[in-house]
Amino acid sequence: MSLIRTAMLLGLMTALFGIAGFALGGEVGMLIALVIAAGMNLYAFWGSDEAVLRAHNARFVTRASAPELVGDVEDMARRAGMPIPKVYIIDEAQPNAFATGRNPENAAVAATTGLLRTLSREEVAGVMAHELAHIKNRDTLIMTVAATLAGAITMLANFGFLFRGRDNGMSFIAVIATLILAPLAAGLVQMAISRTREYEADKVGAEICGQPLWLASALAKISGLAARIDLHSAERNPGTAHLFIVNPLHAHAHDKLFSTHPATENRIRALKKLADGGIGGGQLRTVQPRRSSIPRTRQGSGNPWG
């Protein structure tokens, strides 16, 4: 199903490029745009994960450089019966995290330094379990491709703006359509693919770590802090906002267009119901964490993550 949705998304991008190319340069422009779209389709499928990590200046870490964070991710991935993803850290003060990769065998999770500093180890484990759930559910392919294509569609709008005053047969209406409809389409695509996936990842993440309230507590903290602290790399790349566990945008006007997440209060409420019902009322298979691997820590007791 993920491959089908990804193919549909790539098809949408190709169609948008073709239409924009025709508006900008007639049949020749459309052919050029389709060639560009074909190349971007291949890049979006094979290289979008690396592009997203580069966009946020994520640095790869190992057990040697971040032993507890990497160790806990590896531990939860093994107990969830899934391949172990690579782990990255983003040097940003806002607490947040995301997962990326075209499949579970080629996946990565990334956390900001703000997340590691402000959350307890248990709360970070809940966040990482949520990101592992995205990988396990194979959400990361379409989410990462969408991030790349959103940037490409936004580029179309900028391209149309550059050509707005040239006498190449493109009508004023076509310019307006390129400037307005292309970024709007990017936002709508992301909204359609993200909201329901967040609820499901919360649910499966609770299964992976065995403690829904860890994630509920983390979401409450992240949401409050993200509203006050900029995540500069996300503001520069708003098309990646849907990848994060909580919407990272607030400093600029991108927020409303790229608002892809369900209300944090609703997610916390759902997680509390899972906890009250024994993680889904017994419907989910609980994977209890080893206490020696993920110990309790006092909130605000420092950063044990390396």
Image (cartoon, rainbow, N blue to C red):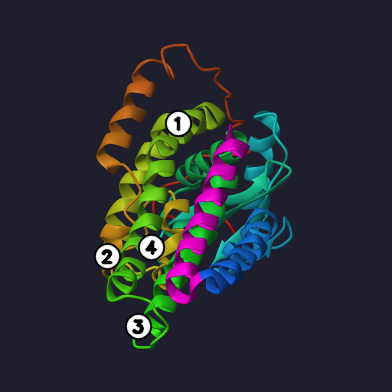
Task: Give the crowd class for mark 3: few <14, some 14-19, many >=20 residues within 10 Å.
Answer: some
Earlier sequence position, callout 4 versus callout 3: 3
Q: Secondary structure at mark 2?
A: loop
Residue 10 counted in the magenta span: yes
Q: Nearer the viewer, residue 187 or 78?
A: 187
Magenta stretch bounds = 1-26
Q: Which mark is residue 174?
A: none
Q: Amino acid at mark 3?
A: Arg
Q: How far apart in space, not on screen, are marks 4 and 1 (Cα)?
A: 29 Å
* Residue furthest out toward the top: 282
Mark 4 touches mark 2? (CB < 8 Å): no
| Residue position for label 3 | 164
**x, y percent for residue 300:** 39, 55
| Residue position for label 4 | 182
Q: How far apart in space, not on screen, are marks 2 and 1 (Cα)?
A: 27 Å
Task: Give the crowd class for mark 1: few <14, some 14-19, many >=20 residues within 10 Å.
Answer: some
Q: Amino acid at mark 2?
A: Arg
The image shows residue 289, relative to residue 252, as above or below, that is above
Residue drawn at x 52%, y 48% is 9
Q: Secondary structure at mark 4?
A: helix
Earlier sequence position, callout 2 versus callout 3: 3
Mark 2 touches mark 1? (CB < 8 Å): no
| Residue position for label 2 | 228
Residue drawn at x 63%, y 44% is 73
Q: How far apart in space, not on screen, are marks 3 and 1 (Cα)?
A: 43 Å
Q: How far apart in space, not on screen, are marks 4 and 2 (Cα)?
A: 29 Å
**x, y percent for residue 230:** 34, 69
| Residue position for label 1 | 200
